[in-house]
Amino acid sequence: MNINDQIISLLERSTKALEKISKPNNRHKVKISSENGYLWSAENFELIPVKNINAININLLKGIDHVKSILLDNTTQFSEGYTANNVLLWGARGMGKSSLVKSVHRELCYKNNKNRLILIEIYRDDIKTLPVLISQLNNFKYRFIIFCDDLSFDNNENHYKSLKTVLDGGIMNRSDNIIFYATSNRRHLMPRSMIENEKSTSITPSESAEEKISLSDRFGLWLGFYQCSQDDYLNIIQSYARHFKLKINENSLKELAIEWSVTRGSRSGRVAWQFIQDRAGKLKIKL
């Protein structure tokens, strides 16, 4: 190949490369369909529609009336176009943290507000892609709740720094149409051992520990969930039984429910629901 052929070949490759760069990159444009729920797939850079969100009637969530009212008010403000806070729902396992988020979204969607409210679930491992997702959502007029269930960070993880930037807005203004809800068993999202280790090994221990603890401070609302009492547990059971019309003697229901909680070693909304599923199956009733 002579020098002229080499130059022509180089120009052709350069032209093709420029054409490729100049074409709209459709892969980096997320699409919103008619559904009000989506899963964020960071690997494929797309929102996967969820036709039927796994949400129950908000009135069936018992024993958490105070936090339920706060989250409903905050989300209502947001859905109506007013300012609202990012929310961290933390505390005991199985007490309805994630169920409450989905039920509040379901309740407001049924009210047919003028602003469409969309729930997007993001997995913990994809938190680092949040800035990219948010940059795409800014192009829509809808209201978005980005929801991360069971959010926590372990040793040697730095994804929490990306989340801190997103919650505070970073160099970009905070998006008016996006709010972030997360659930966690840990109030500070970090294991206590991780924080204590930073205090004992860092050159400036207080500053290093504060950096990690300060993540939860980015959430305007902290809603605490605590292990329920036996009375609350039985109240949840009875509420489910009435709603699903389980034909069983009240005393028998109480005795069986207590026995079920003893075998599980705990009392919670999740344990109550598992008991109701067991009873309904035995009674040949579909929930």
Image (cartoon, helix red, strand yellow):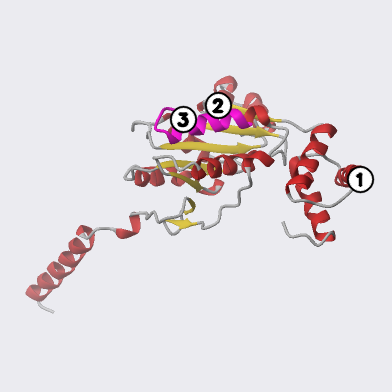
Amino acid carrying label 2: it is: Leu
Q: Nearer the viewer, residue 193 or 59?
A: 59
Residue 209, quarter of picture:
top right
Question: Which of labels 3 and 2 is toward the front?
Answer: 3
Q: Which residues are magenta?
A: 68-86
In the rendered image, which residue does mark 3 sit on?
77
Magenta residues: mostly which secondary structure?
Answer: helix
Q: Where on the picture, by quarter, is residue 225? A: top right
Above or below for 103 versus 220:
below
Task: Answer left or right for 198 relative to 127.
Answer: right
Asked whether 85 falls inside the magenta stretch, the response is yes
Say what amino acid the circle numbered 1 marks: Glu
Is 233 situated left or right of 58 in this image?
right
Q: Is residue 217 magenta?
A: no
Q: Where is mark 1, residue-wise?
A: 259
Q: Can residue 95 be seen in this snapshot?
A: yes
7 and 287: which one is in front?
287
Secondary-structure class at tag 3 = helix
- C-beta proximity under 8 Å, tags 3 and 1: no
Split into 4 quadrants, where in the image is the N terminus? bottom left
Residue identified by numbered label 2: 221
